[in-house]
Amino acid sequence: MSGSVGVALLGAGNIGSGVIAALVRSAGRYAARVGRPLEVRHVLVRDMLRPRPGVASGLITGDLGVILEDAETRIVIELMGGEEPARAYIERCLRAGRHVVTANKEVMAKAGGELLQIAHEHGVRLLYEASVGGGIPIIAPLSRDLLANEVTAVTAIINGTTNYMLTAMAQQGADYEDVLAEAQALGYAEPDPTADVEGIDASFKLAVLCGLAFNVAVAPEQIARQGISGIAAVDIAYAEQLGYVIKLLARARLVDGEVEATVQPTLVPVEEPLAKVDGVLNAVQIEGDLVGRVVFEGPGAGPGPTASSVLADVLDAAQDVVAGRAPLAFVPRRTVRVRPPEEHRSRYYLRITVQDRPGVLARIAQALGDAQISIASFIQYEVEGAEGTAELVFTTHHADGGALRGAIGVIEAMDVVQEIGNVLPMAGEEAAR
Amino acid sequence: MSGSVGVALLGAGNIGSGVIAALVRSAGRYAARVGRPLEVRHVLVRDMLRPRPGVASGLITGDLGVILEDAETRIVIELMGGEEPARAYIERCLRAGRHVVTANKEVMAKAGGELLQIAHEHGVRLLYEASVGGGIPIIAPLSRDLLANEVTAVTAIINGTTNYMLTAMAQQGADYEDVLAEAQALGYAEPDPTADVEGIDASFKLAVLCGLAFNVAVAPEQIARQGISGIAAVDIAYAEQLGYVIKLLARARLVDGEVEATVQPTLVPVEEPLAKVDGVLNAVQIEGDLVGRVVFEGPGAGPGPTASSVLADVLDAAQDVVAGRAPLAFVPRRTVRVRPPEEHRSRYYLRITVQDRPGVLARIAQALGDAQISIASFIQYEVEGAEGTAELVFTTHHADGGALRGAIGVIEAMDVVQEIGNVLPMAGEEAAR
């Protein structure tokens, strides 16, 4: 074995460049921690002709085989993004006995359990701190510091784009379309913002968190998902009057051995720590039987924070290489039932536009009562510029998702109801089922 | 080697009992993670006659020698508290080749560097997650997840008692003595509250954090320390008018290769994450070159949270025992200069009680100007029930601690000045020196 620990990168975009720059800048400190220097031996890229400042041209390759044939390369850092070929490349590296560090939430969400099993079978590690929450240490605290706990719930703001947009809507009283344009202009939102605003990105990350927190396999498509594009400025204003802010929460709970997992715009009481997480910041709240509740907050994206997490994993794997340490005991993920949204119990916020006529409120209240849904608060608003129209805002006590859906169907069919403006869950104390 | 990993406890108070209860309750899950069951083999107590519910009487011993002679005991958990004999016992266990897990902030603050060196020399680990921030994962994130960063600053609320008291003063407009009595009645403050209210407890924890964050040795007595007993209700009210809350901040920074470390009541801008940490909660904010800023928040004390951290360390050490893993590379702590408070640069809040006469403000402003201290804001208040007396509140731009101290001396000596009410640092953007 040579005097250094060989590393290869798959992908050399913004984050890859940041990782390489930090490896150069902090080489001495990292070598002291690891016991040997780290050496970048290969950088796999798709376009070999594009100039890569900061990367020696001799390191560039277009062929994964070159990396797998080099016995000195012990750690492979996957920063390509997307599902394929990233997943296949990670699998090939693991099967070839290489430790793999990845920032790929999509691969870890869709194939994490299987890849971790393959890593175990080949005596290597698959590390993925950067796949959730950018620079926030969250994977290792769950894997290590909170391991003594039975984790019962994970509640997170793990998409910076949507949190920026919802914060801007709340602070400016602006509508969705306006803040989306603003976020796009600032580079916080993509030209096609679907993955962020529809909660797809957050659902990948929540699936990763479920694997870690509960050691259960949850596929992204099992997560009940609702984006923020239906949130109106009035919803945010009404929520504020009620003492809440609207956040795109990724939530997972273990209830009676089953999992509930949702990504939804949710009313969060203003006094909750997560209500105070503004702008592009991310935060993850963990509840465990011993610790109670802990919250981790920080930058959820960007080259620096992502490089911080990627390199933490690299240093960890490199320490194992130098010490000749074997990976720890492997506990395969359990498969448990994932509850459909109809079975989730929650408090709800309802905004309903109606014709302003006598008896309307009674009919709606009746429909809710018939479904065993109890009203916690009610406010009626006039609708500006729409005479004869009123907006009714209800909050409910805890109710079953299925019962609520049924009642909403009944209410929507009423002749006096113009529109179901919004139906959103509310966070806070959960009812014992 | 037997089929279990043997564990001994030193101390069987509240936390020890919580640790034992969790080891029983979660035995199956812990065994799966470790690869073998954990077995409590000894519990060292001072008073052998006191009944210990939940502890088999055969486990109780009054003699550390019994534990050191038992080759099956691989991990010792120190929960005695206080400096001696805890420090000496930890040292004996390490020298006898036992991994040690401790919650002892005082020992780790005063002798941590030396004990870590001894652990290294004997091929064992000394783990101390529970010594700072109760259940909040903070030691391991600093040791592992943020290792790729050059950490430049640590800012923390790490004493729940004082944070509870300052929060109560802010919310109730109450004075120090009243909230202290309330905190004592609720069990949040000790009958002798000195260690908490004078910042001694926080200074131990900050010393531990300096070792981890910067890998430098800082003794508790090198930390500039000021308690909260001098904080008046009016200071909190004036701070609020200026857009700040007063928190007992433990702060450490690396500046030009030197350390500044303080525990002081500090004005924190309301929009900062740490300003929103209320009641007995703790929070630790870390700044690093890659990650930017991350914040960890949670319960800073209590049997459950402390057991959570102690057991995380125990599981970690037990995994090493089972895998036969050697400890990682050891980097001894550096000794760097710790700057005295006169050299710290900060913004300051000054409250000065004066005779309400013409020319007073000019004389004080002159004294500040002579010391090169530039005033950022100024408000004059009438003092109720004290005719002819006024209270002047200044905030300054960044100034040297020594220059400020000199100016305060000049101002205090003025015949028109009745009292220097308070001088407190202000957090927020720091000036480049």
Image (tube, coloured by chain):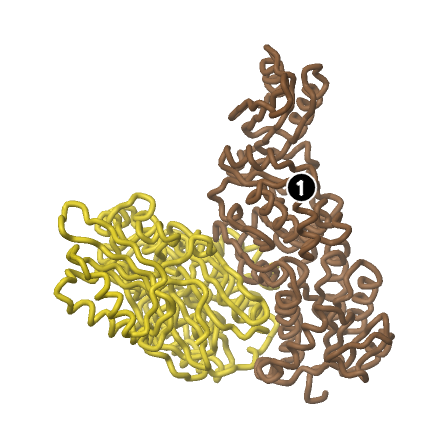
Chain colours: A brown, B yellow
Residue A428 falls left or right of residue A311: left
Nearest the viewer among A53 and B169 is A53
Q: Residue at x 40, y 67 (%)?
A: B251
Residue A51 falls left or right of residue B225: right
Locate the N terminus of chain B by quadrant: bottom right
Which residue, as the protein is rendered here, is positioned at the far front?
B358
Q: Residue at x 63, y 53 (%)?
A: A160
Residue A139 falls left or right of residue A291: right
- Can you give x and y, in whole percent of width and height, for residue A65 in the image? 86, 76
User: On the image, which quarter does residue A90 sit in?
Assistant: bottom right
Q: Is residue B315 visible?
A: yes
Query: Label 1 is placed on what type of residue?
Result: Tyr
Q: Residue at x 42, y 80 (%)?
A: B258
Give the answer, above or below, for where B160 lies relative to A233.
below
- Can you give x and y, in whole percent of width and height, for residue B249 in the image? 37, 62
Nearest the viewer among B103 and A194 is A194
Under circle 1, the secondary element is: helix
Q: Residues within 10 Å of mark 1 (few under 14, many from 20)?
A: some
Nearest the viewer among B125 and B358 is B358
Which residue, as the protein is rendered here, is positioned at the far bottom?
A3
In this figure, which residue is indicated by the disc labeled 1? A176
User: On the image, which quarter does residue A344 sit in?
Assistant: top right
Q: Is residue B61 visible?
A: no
Q: Chain of mark 1?
A: A
